[in-house]
Image (cartoon, helix red, strand yellow):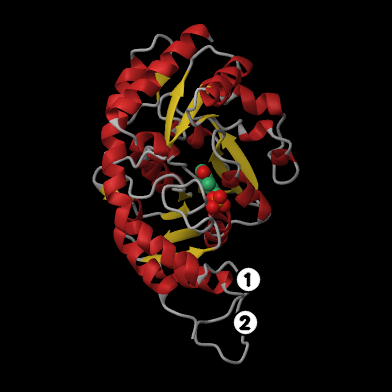
Amino acid sequence: MGGTEVESFEREFAGYHGAQHALAVTNGTHALELALQAMGVGPGTEVIVPGFTFISSSQAAQRIGAVAVPVDVDPDTYCVDVAAAAAAITSRTRVIMPVHMAGLIADMDGLDKLAADSGVQLLQDAAHAHGAQWQGKRVGELGSVAVFSFQNGKLMTAGEGGAVLFPDEEMYEQAFLRHSCGRPRTDRRYHHQIAGTNMRMNEFSAAVLRAQMTRLDAQIEVRGQRWQAFSDLLAQIPGVRPQSGDPRADRNPHYMAMFRLPGWSEERRNLLVDRLVEAGIPAFAAFRAIYRTAAFWETGAPAESVDAVAERCPNVEAISQDCVWLHHRTLLASEQDLADTAAIVAELVATG
Ligand SMILES: *Cc1c(COP(=O)(O)O)cnc(C)c1O
């Protein structure tokens, strides 16, 4: 008997997001690998990913033998550009992976239409999007497979952990087998049915995550109110452009408070981040374009040069150099603290 925390967490997490099934796993990167495999991704196939994301989005596809194809993002939401995704579809494309950047849901209407027209499936990388909504619908109600992370920095955490939401029983059962060494739930005779590995979440993590679910809504509420005020203050600073939303993304849990400094070089942005950190603000440089890392080109890269990819991803190029983000705990502080933070940003931007 292994305990009941994982099963309870899966049921509660699926219910909270309006999904039929949730599978709790070791981490978000494994969750992406497992989901992609359940969707038929492997050698000889391609997965379209935004060029601006945490590298797990592309590494998960590459790790299971597929080619990751980076495409451009929107300059304001930083989420995948639907037209760019459409242009990258080939006969080998199995999946388009929108990333809900910082909790802001990608254009799911445009992507659903693209998926329906092209026959390519969607996999939502919702590692930033616990509790997020698109037109009143939670991630699990949007009809596609979705992946979450509970890594140390995320909005819900057990140090490490991940989950996959499935709208479909068959894919869920297949993923269950794969995440548990190919072994059915009730097996006592070592009849491993399909190839797999151990990606199971442990009972301790599930217990921690169940407790965290009880405070998620209240925290989302506070961060939402604070971001509204804070982004207004940021927008008043000359040269600063806060991440801005598609109004259809009508609930944002705000994993990061992101803003751009259009026209700034990477070096100048990095110096600003250092000065913000010195001033006591938990600031970070935004993700490097995935195709500008050595890791991306080791395996499963498209047959293109870096320059060719960069040329069709102008917004990824700009955002990855000029964007700064602040840790989500910033948005749980008092309104006065946030006004002080905005004042520091204004001063350092003006002198940076
Ligand atoms: C954190 C993250 C992941 C991976 O999650 P881990 O639990 O750290 O493996 C995947 N995608 C995005 C966008 C992330 O930010």
Q: Tell me the quarter of the image containing the C terminus.
A: top right
- Specify the quadrant of the image occupied by residue 248: top left
Q: Is residue 184 left or right of residue 342?
A: right
The answer to whether residue 131 of the structure is visible from this angle is yes
Q: Amino acid at mark 1?
A: Gly
Q: In the rendered image, which residue does mark 1 sit on? A: 196
The answer to whether residue 249 of the structure is visible from this angle is no
Query: Can you give x and y, in whole percent of width and height, for residue 33 in the image?
Result: 58, 57
Query: Can you give x and y, in whole percent of width and height, for residue 61 in the image?
Result: 61, 50
Tag 1, which secondary structure? loop
Residue name at image x 61 percent, y 47 percent: 46
Q: Is residue 235 left or right of residue 61?
A: left
Tag 2, which secondary structure? loop
Mark 1 Cβ inside 8 Å of ligand 1: no
Query: Can you give x and y, in whole percent of width and height, for residue 323 in the image?
Result: 51, 24
Task: Indicate which disc residue 192 carries.
Answer: 2
Residue name at image x 61 percent, y 92 percent: 189
